[in-house]
Image: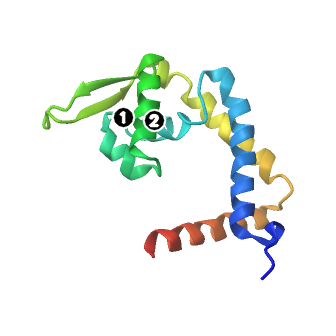
Amino acid sequence: MKFEKENSAGYLVNHTARLFAAGLQERITPLGITIGQFPILLELWIKDGVTQRELLEKLALEQATLANTLNRMERDGLIVRKKHPADARSQQIWLTEKGQAPRDSAYQAASDQNEHSLAPLSDEEREQFLGLMRRIINAAHSG
């Protein structure tokens, strides 16, 4: 069997993701955000005050990776951790003003990156592309 990366869904998805990430990183660096922090911030902008366990359930990250990123975010003043009122063993993660501030600009940066990356596709092709990716993701989660 001959393997051709140009015909490998895994290779193409990974390469596309790296290109999206590089473009997004370029757009969010001026906001003081790294690509590793972005998914965490997205979750906290939706629901603040979650636990590390809740973030792990939402994000496909290793425990150690999340812990290290949260430590850096706390060091950089983007988040604070406070004892959970109902569970002394866990802490809630809260955004600071500095962590809340870039939200709208970061959303715009992500929108701009998506628009730039999907520019070669028609509106119909974009809908089809996103729909197909969602189906693949849903299938991967269910089986």
Q: Secondary structure at mark 2?
A: helix
Q: Give above or below for 99 relative to 138.
A: above
Residue situated furthest right in the rendering: 120
Residue contact at pointers 2 and 1, CB within 8 angstroms: yes
Task: Please tell me which residue lies in front, 82 or 104.
Answer: 82
Q: Which mark is residue 17?
A: none
> Horizontal placement of 47 versus 21: left or right?
left
- The residue carrying pointer 1 sits among few (fewer than 14), some (14 to 19) or many (20 or more) residues within 10 Å by Cα, namely some
Residue 135: x and y, percent? 58, 72
Name the kind of residue labelled 2 in the image. Answer: Trp
Quarter of the picture containing the N terminus is bottom right
Above/below status of 58 relative to 42: below
Residue 16: percent from the left, percent from the top? 74, 54
User: Label 2, label 1: how many angstroms apart (C-alpha)?
Assistant: 6 Å
Q: Tell me where residue 27 appears, x and y as whole percent.
A: 72, 31
Q: To which residue does mark 1 refer? A: 48
Q: Could you tell me which residue is drawn at 63 percent across and 66 percent down?
A: 133
Is residue 40 shown above or below 76?
Answer: below
Name the quarter where the C terminus is drawn: bottom left
Q: Residue at x 17, y 35 (%)?
A: 89
Residue 95 is situated, as x and y percent measured from the top left of the image, at: 40, 26
Q: Is residue 127 visible?
A: no
User: Which quadrant of the view contains residue 45?
Assistant: top left
Q: Amino acid at mark 1?
A: Asp
Residue at image position (37%, 52%) is 57
Within the image, what quadrant is residue 106 found in? top right
110 and 89: which one is in front? 89
- Give the SS element for disc 1: loop
**Residue 40 shows in this picture:** yes
Say few, some or many: other residues with alpha carbon within 10 Å of mark 2 (under 14 / 14 to 19 / 20 or more): some
Q: Tell me the residue that label 2 is attached to.
A: 45
